Structure formats: structure tokens, C-alpha cells
Amino acid sequence: MAAAEASNKYAIALRRQKPGFAFVLIISGVISVLMLTGSIYMLQVYDRVLSSGSIVTLMGLFAIVVVLYLFFGLFDLLRQRMLARIGTRLECDLGRSGFLAQLQAKQGDKNGAVDPLRHLSGISQFLSGPTAGNLFDLPFVPVFLAVLFIVHPVLGLIVVGGAVVAGVSALIAGFIARRWQEHRNQGAARQAEFAAETVRNTETVIAMGMQNNLAAHWQTMQLASLKTHQQAARGTEILASFSKTFRILLQSSILTVGAVLVLKEQISPGMIIASSVLSGRVLAPVDQAIGQWRAIAQTVFAHRALLSFFERAKDKAGNIDLPKPSGRLAVTSLTKFAAGATATRQELLLQSVSFSLEPGDGLGVIGKSAAGKSILARLLVGAWQPDRGEVRIDGAGFDKWPAGSIGRHIGYLPQSVTLLPGTIGQNIARFDPHATDGDIVAAAQLANVHDLILRLPNGYATEVGGASGSPLSGGQIQRIALARAVIFKPSLIVLDEPNAHLDGAGDTALEDAITQLRAAGCTVIVMAHRPSAIAAVNKILILDQGRMTKFGDKDKILGKPARPQSPPVRQQLSNHARQG
């Protein structure tokens, strides 16, 4: 059963941490009181010990100070560990949801610019650092101010004035940082994406001598990002330097005013040093906040981005896990616009495509390049969302299934095939821990790749994808991806150019696989340029510039052949594939 009601998972996870934050706040209050130890100790030393000359009194006071500082260190450690655990809990609670939501958001590149996992990691690291603890000291600044007012109202007013100046500096620093933070993050994301894509296509880049050009382009992006970073840092650096200087000057001012008050016999000599320490404690949290404002601004930005992201990625209410579909497919007025389309300018990629298939049907989709075959494939499997129309499997649209549930019953072989970092066995199994060795081998045999895998040194345990690279050719990768698509014999299987890298033997194996899948009741759709890919289908759909021009039985559209594999039939299929 899916979630009973739509919810912002990030907001819920934060609410679950409220007891932890409350505990940290209480500990911070205790720490703030213990911070008065130094001031009170100085006051007692100057006013009691020096005037009485009692070593016993000094040792007694020092013993008390040692115990209090031990408690101070214990509570400070406890606060840091508690904040670190809160950050870890947030990552644990939201890591899987963030990963799934990010994948979901990539459909049609919707919200694709947000990286929730990176933002979660940033917030967790912030909570584990010293800055978060310093922020919890801010609410207790009035405690030190109150003590200063008790010592003398004039001293309290001076420090209040200093706190106001420091606070205004912090607000200005925050405004400057927020102004540039979003631009900096966007630039850094574009720079990282460009570098990752370049590395992913290293062979092409080196083969065509593009590395110097790409390095120059990346450096241009880097310089723009660094310029934004410097613009954001310049103002906060000036304000941080001003705040530090002002804080030192204020402490000297406190000593000067305190000396005047001692001369007028309004306070004791010990209160001068105590007041100086207290004024430092009042301004220290503000000063530290200004010095760490960039980290604070990044965390605030990440917090707002996560709130917005998870608000858009709320669970759909009321969805239940439906039984495995039989494969009955109904496509109605399927339409897709190009990215960036507006109400006045809408470039159509696919227009009003409608057809239906029964379980066991095989459909061959043919047409010229850019006719819309790959776009139709993505829409049929739910990788993209249509702008108009709908796709229904056994009468249910994709939005009627819990997220990820319908995917178990769909097999998809994209035109551009990549394998995920892991073993060949894990890739074929779709990383499903419940897939048995028998399931994996059966899928590999169906895709005619079992013997090839066994010839590899590590067999099904061979590492592919990621930093380990791949010991496989393009055709071998495509056949392994075909095995991944057909494992468990899904109800709907969509193959986009499945024989693009196959030889004659591979074509024959593909035809046999499609025949077996259809015999098992699977609905198979094949996007094809080469006629051999549609030899085992019974229906044909012809696309031309995103429009469906013909749909029906293959024998009626292409003409019934006298012999299944005669040369005229192959030539006729080839002509239709080229002409659309």
C-alpha cells in the first residue's frame, strides 16, 4: 500500500528530529551558564583572594572551577555528538526517498537541476561541524547581557550597542551571501555535469582531439563560477574583519569604562575583568556566525531547496499495488512537445498516436530517422510523461501504480545502452536481491548471451560500468541489456533498435527471443530500421515526422509474403523502413 496521504517527507523527517533539537537547546543553556565560570572565578579571585591573601580559598575556588569545566567539556561533547547524529538520521531517513525522488524528477528533466542527495549530505556535514553548535549559543546571549546589567547598567548598554552593530553586520553579510549563493550553486552544478559527461565520453573526446577545446570550455565555466564565488566572499570577508576588529575595540572600551566606574567606586576591581570576559561571550556567537556565514548560507539554501523539492515530489495518495498485468495496451492521443514549448510556440515531437495491443501481440514501429520512434518508446514505458493523451496497461495508467511498481512488469531496451556499475549478473537481475540464479541464466539464454558470459574470466561476476570500465563490445552490451529487459518475462517489452549492433546470428537469436516472449503472452514492441528486427511481429505501425500514418496487421500493410524469408519480402520491409 502506498502512503495514505501526500506528504513532504523532508518536513516530516525534520519534525521527527524536534526532540533531538530540543535536547541540544537545553544542553546549550547549561553550557551558557557554565561559560560564566571564568567571569565569576576572576571576580572572586580579585575581590576575595587577593584582598584576603588566603591560599586555601584560592585552591577551593580552583577545585570548583575544574569540576565545572569538566562538566562544560562533557556537555559540549554531548551537544556535538547529538547534532552529528541528527544529521546522520536525516540522511538515513531521506537517502532512499531522495534517490527515488531524484530519479522520478528526471522524467522530462522536471526538477532535474536539484540534487537532493548532495543537499542532504551538506546539511549533515553542517550539523556535524562546530558552526551548528555556535548557533545554539545565540538564544542565550541575553543571559550574559543580564549579568552585565546586574554588574552595571552602563556596561550592559555598551555591550547592547556593540551587539546591535555586530547583528547589523551579520544581516548585511547574509544579504550579500544569499544574493550570490544560488548563482554559484547553479554554475557549480553545470560545471560538474559538463566534466562528468566529458569523462563519460573519454574515448570519443581523445579519438577526435577534442580534449583541449573541452578543457578550455570547462575552464571558462570554472572562471565564471570562481568569479561569482569571489563576489560572494568579498563582502562577507570585509564584514568579518570589521566585526573582529570591533569586538576587540569593544572589549578595550569595556575595560576603560570599567576603570572609570571603579575610580568612582561604583563597581569593584574584579568586575572590570569579569565584564570584559562577559562582553566577549555576548559578541562571540555573533562574530562566529559572521565568520561562517557562507556555510550557513549554503545550508539555508539546501534546506529551502529540499523543502521545495520534496513538496513537488509528494507521494500520490491512494495508489495500491495492482496485480501483474496481462499486457493489454491502450494508447490514446499520445502527444509530446519539444522541451521549452510555450502556449504560443509548441514544437511537436509526437502527435496524437493511438493504437491498442492484446497480450502476445508483437508490434513493429518503423519510420525514417527522427520520425519519433525513440520518443514513443520512452512514453510507452513511462520514462517520459506525455503532454497529452495517455498510456494504459490493463486499463490502468502509470499514475495509478505506486512509484516503481509498474516497472517490474516492463522490459525496456533503450537505443543508447549503458550498464550500471556492478556485475553482469546484477545488471541482468536489475539489482533485484530476490532474483535467483535461475532467473538470471534463463534471461541470458533467452537473449543468447549466456555462452558469451561464460567465456569471460569471471563469468556473471564480471564487473562492468563505472570506473571499472567494460570488457565488452557494443553488441555484447546490447545483448546483456536485452537480457535485463526480458528477465521475469515482463508483460510489456519495448525494444528500441535492438539489433543495431548485432550480426546475422544475433538477428536470428533476437527473432527467436521475440517469438518465445510472444508465445509466453508478453506484448512486444520493436522500434526498427532493419527489417530483421520485425520479422517476428504481427502488427506494424509507421511513423512519419511524429505522426502515425499506418497501423494494422503486418500482412495487410506490407503484403503477405509467399515464403517467410524470400528476398522480395526482405526488400519490401527494407523499403518501408527507409521510406516510413
Image (spheres, rainbow, N blue to C red):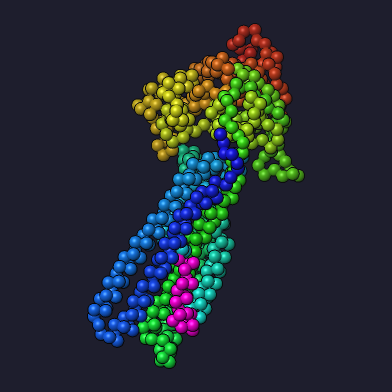
Tell me where residue 479 appears, x and y as whole percent.
49, 24
Q: Residue 361 vs residue 81: left or right? A: right
Tell me where residue 245 appears, x and y as whole percent.
45, 76
Q: Is residue 571 visible?
A: no
Task: Report the number of discs.
Answer: 0
Residue at 44 percent across and 30 percent down: it is: 433
Q: Which residues are magenta?
A: 137-156
Residue furthest out toward the right: 344
Q: Quadrant of residue 555?
A: top right
Residue at 55 percent across and 68 percent down: it is: 171
Residue in the foreground of this view, choosing between 116 and 507: 116
The quarter of the rendered structure image containing the C terminus is: top right
Determine if the magenta segment contains residue 139: yes
Determine if the magenta segment contains residue 86: no
Residue furthest out toward the left: 55
Residue in the foreground of this view, choosing between 371 and 553: 553
Position of residue 398 relative to residue 241, above or below, is: above
Q: Residue 326 vs residue 473: left or right? A: right
Residue at 42 percent across and 68 percent down: it is: 32
Q: Is residue 425 visible?
A: yes
Position of residue 237 relative to residue 89, above or below, is: below
The quarter of the rendered structure image containing the N terminus is: top right
Position of residue 558 relative to residue 247, above or below, is: above
Tell me where residue 380 appears, x and y as whole percent.
62, 29
Residue furthest out toward the top: 562
Tell me where residue 425 appears, x and y as whole percent.
42, 28
Our reading of the magenta stretch's main secondary structure is: helix
Position of residue 329 relative to residue 186, above or below, is: above
Residue at 49 percent across and 64 percent down: it is: 293
Q: Residue 384 vs residue 226: left or right? A: right
Residue in the foreground of this view, choosing between 269 and 537: 269
